[in-house]
Amino acid sequence: MTKVAGFQPESIRNIVLLGHAGSGKTTLAEAVLHRCGAITRMGSVDAATTISDFEPEAKQHHHSTNSTLLFATCEGREVNMIDTPGSPELVGHALAALPAVETAVIVVNASAGVELGTRRLFHAAGEAGLARMIVVNRIDENLAGLPALVESLRAALGPELHCINLPTRKGEDVIDCFDQDAGPSDFGSVAEVHKEMLESTIEVDDATLERYLGGETIRLPELRQDFVVAMNRGHVVPILFTSATKEVGIDDLLHILVEEAPSPQSGRPRRLRKGQAGELIDVSCDAKKPFLAHVFKITTDPYLGKLSMLRILQGSLDGNTQFVCGPSKKVMKAGHILKVEGRDHPELSTTAFAGDLVAIAKLDDLHVDMILRDPAVDDDWAPARPPYPTPMYALAVDLKNKADEVKLSSALQRLVEEDPTLRAVQDPQTHELVLSGIGELHLRVTMEKLKNRFNLEVVARQPTIAYKETITGRSEGHFRLKKQTGGAGQFAEVFLRVEPLPRGNGYEFVDEVYGGAIPHNFIPACDKGCQDALERGVVAGFPANDVRVTLTDGKSHSVDSKDASFRTAAKFAMRDAMSRANPVLLEPIVTLEITVPERHVGDITGDLKNKRGHVVGVEVGGAGMVVVRAQAPLAELGRYAGQLRSFTGGQGSFVMELSHYDVVPHAVQQKVAAERKPHAAAEE
């Protein structure tokens, strides 16, 4: 096995490539690896020969479907890169990578401009405290449109964006506008861009700014020091121009990544949340402190098994380093320390130090966002990162071969471990196996992985909607249980009151029984009986919530009263009360972000009205695309992916997240209840 050397923190650069699908992130990564000498020739996305897109799903779709770790060396520094998927439906992989790096390179397609994924990931990287830079790629395809693109980038992402180089020689090269204040360019003035970058950079240093305003010339080494600080703080976001397929601008990009991008030592400290209160703690990148690491990615290798990728936050790691994870006191060792280059995993020949991105194999207890620590370090740590979107697009899946059920459970567990936005749950109401993700593409890729990796074929269909029930009024309930069949019988009588709670408050039980009418030892049984009733509401048999129950009175028998008797009596008293408390059905309402060509906006908004939805806002997304933000009932969106493709000729996409639950219109409630009640009765 090939072995590679480890690097000290000051010589490491950790980069994540972000951007919308089609911006050229994977090709850019290939160009960087080629210029560094890590590969002998560049691969092609179309030919499915890139280092990043080695999985069958990525080759089939001709775009990344998973995040991939890569590394190279340049000028004595190690450059770790994470190439992430650009589809908004696969954003979980990109968000999971943010805490592992110091620098985010947001790649923009010169022809497409600012797309939905561009804006979202740019701001997510800022929230994570990363230094950011914009790479405008594929400049040879839209050289004339670059001036307008720069203005649209600034309008969409902020005035702190400044060009640090410009295309020249008709897009065949770039000219450095930071080091140089004159020269030819395809658009703009090198002198003006140089002055703009210089003045923005020195604003972070009051002393340097005073000297500049006093007429003093600032030396280039000082400017570069200030530039590093300005980029770290987000005060300056440089724009660079590349054509990755022709390797134009790649050397300039590499120079900035190696010389100006922050190292784990000079970048903003990585943050962890400590304790139940979630107090933010800065973790200094100190290789001499006790070991601390963050698991940012899990994958399965056909030869090594489970592979856990780590960002070493502090300390160092070798094969004999002992650590624990989470609240567990089980001590583990890493064994072999690996670097990751796509599908290859060369072993480190030396210790891995703080700041490095490495992998360890065959530790089944690890999962994404787990913090590994020296046994002497306190537990209860969690990474500080932007929240993952809630998976709301769901499909019920059935195996073609029923004999593979045990195998399917194991396979889904592995896939869920790898993807923080994927869920696989056996619905207790419908007994369906439901896969939930961010969108249709997300779940399609998941089912392809089941087939390609585990040889499991499934058939997908629309799942039963997870309705809920609640009450809107106040009512009294009563039930008397009396059974005598010879010997000890059953007796319990319960009086109670129900009333609605504010949405989202769940369930509340109040004991107002006086004088021992119900002995104290039977009160918990009454509470359980009320919760039993809530498991299947009175409208259509769906779970009910947001209800306060007040136990007011009752009767018991010295011999015949038991816990089971009061549990049963409370359950039926609860149903009695709820049936007269104006019960209603609640349906999940989702927030949609629909990206479509501008000419289709009218069709989309009209269709949403027919689906009982309403438009919240419309935003221009660039390149003739518009983002429509709306809310609609999930029940109306079962086949929306296909309908949207039909409306837009395949050019539309959408993502959705749960917003809230709301009352179903009466006509819809009657229809759902009529369809559901026979099933609910059969399940009693």
Image (tube, rainbow, N blue to C red):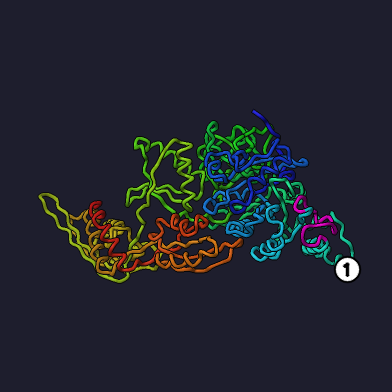
Residue at image coords 58%, 54%: 385
Q: Is residue 492 above or below residue 313?
A: below
Q: Is residue 131 visible?
A: no
| 222, 171: nearer the viewer | 171
**Which portion, as a residue range, is magenta?**
170-190
| 444, 541: nearer the viewer | 444
Q: Quadrant of the N terminus?
A: top right
Q: Position of residue 331 (x, y in %)?
A: 55, 37
Q: Is residue 447 above or below residue 610?
A: above
Position of 496 compared to 650: left or right?
Answer: left
Q: Position of residue 48 (x, y in %)?
A: 59, 40
Q: Is residue 326 magenta?
A: no
Q: Position of residue 642 (x, y in %)?
A: 44, 54
Q: Is residue 176 magenta?
A: yes
Give the residue furthest to the right.
216
Image-quadrant location for residue 27:
top right
**Residue type of the residue flagged with mark 1:** Gly
Give the residue furthest to the top.
1
Q: Is residue 583 visible?
A: yes
Majority SS type along the magenta span: loop
| 191, 373: nearer the viewer | 191
The kind of secondary structure element at disc 1 is loop
Q: Position of residue 507 (x, y in %)?
A: 36, 62
